[in-house]
Image: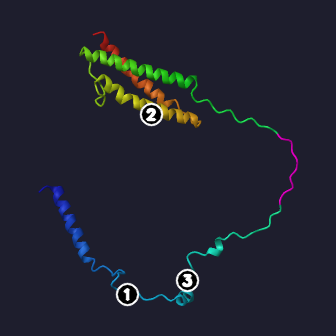
């Protein structure tokens, strides 16, 4: 028996001994033991107040003086122009990320075909369809998150697309070493 098992068995014996020393459990109310009747007069004498007083929650009618309406000129305010979310910067980052993703995958497939390289990411499938099927939903989720942050006016909305661009740019840089071989 190993040292860890000895400690575990000693702890189990100790817990069993502590529960045995605890004595009998106190009696809980049950259906076979009759409960004494409660007298409301005794409760009032003890100063117990009801848990809910409906009178405290009923709205009391109050008389409110109505203000006199003063004629004011009607000013038509233009609604605020909604902030454009899908603009040039967002479209540039999305296009760049999509292009680099496709270039990275096609270059990887090319060098895998000629057995001059191996996929560096152990979680990435090596099949053509597998690469796209595993990465495109991730890219879409990152761009959706980025879109929502930009729509809410949050700073650093561009960070997620930049991570996609950077990771696939690094993949292309690695692939360029193997393409010529």
Mark sitting earlier along the chain (3/2): 3
Please give the count of numbered marks on the rendered protein.
Answer: 3
Mark 3 and mark 1: span between their CA atoms? 23 Å
Q: Find disc 2 in the rendering and name its residue.
A: 141
Disc 3 element: loop
Q: Is residue 39 above or below residue 75?
A: below
Residue 179 versus residue 65: which sits nearer the camera?
65
Quadrant of the snapshot with the C terminus: top left
| Residue 35 image offset from top left, x and y in percent | 40, 86
Q: Which residue is mark 3?
A: 48
CB under 8 Å between callouts 3 and 2? no
* Location of mark 1 (residue): 34
Say which of 151 and 119 sits in front.
Answer: 151
Residue 87 x %, y %: 58, 25
Q: Residues within 10 Å of mark 1 (few under 14, many from 20)?
A: few
Whether residue 174 sits left or right of residue 72 in the image: it is left
Question: Residue, x 19% and y 68% (percent of image)?
Answer: 13
Tell me the crowding category of disc 3: few under 14, some 14 to 19, or many 20 or more residues within 10 angstroms, Cα based. few
């Amino acid at each position: 028996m190993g040292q860890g098992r000895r400690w575990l068995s000693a702890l189990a014996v100790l817990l069993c001994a502590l529960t045995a020393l605890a004595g009998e459990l106190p009696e809980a109310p049950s259906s076979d033991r009759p409960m004494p009747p409660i007298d409301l007069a005794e409760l009032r004498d003890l100063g117990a107040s009801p848990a809910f007083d409906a009178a405290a929650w009923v709205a009391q009618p109050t008389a409110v003086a109505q203000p006199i309406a003063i004629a004011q000129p009607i000013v038509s305010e233009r609604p605020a122009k909604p902030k454009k979310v899908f603009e040039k910067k967002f479209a540039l980052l999305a296009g760049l990320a999509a292009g680099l993703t496709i270039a990275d995958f096609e270059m990887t497939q090319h060098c895998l075909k000629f057995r001059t390289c191996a996929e560096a990411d152990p979680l990435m499938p090596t099949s053509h369809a597998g690469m796209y099927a595993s990465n495109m939903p991730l890219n879409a989720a990152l761009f959706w998150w980025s879109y929502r942050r930009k729509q809410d006016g949050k700073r650093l909305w561009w960070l997620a697309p930049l991570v996609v661009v950077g990771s696939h740019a690094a993949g292309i840089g690695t692939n360029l070493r193997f393409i010529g071989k």
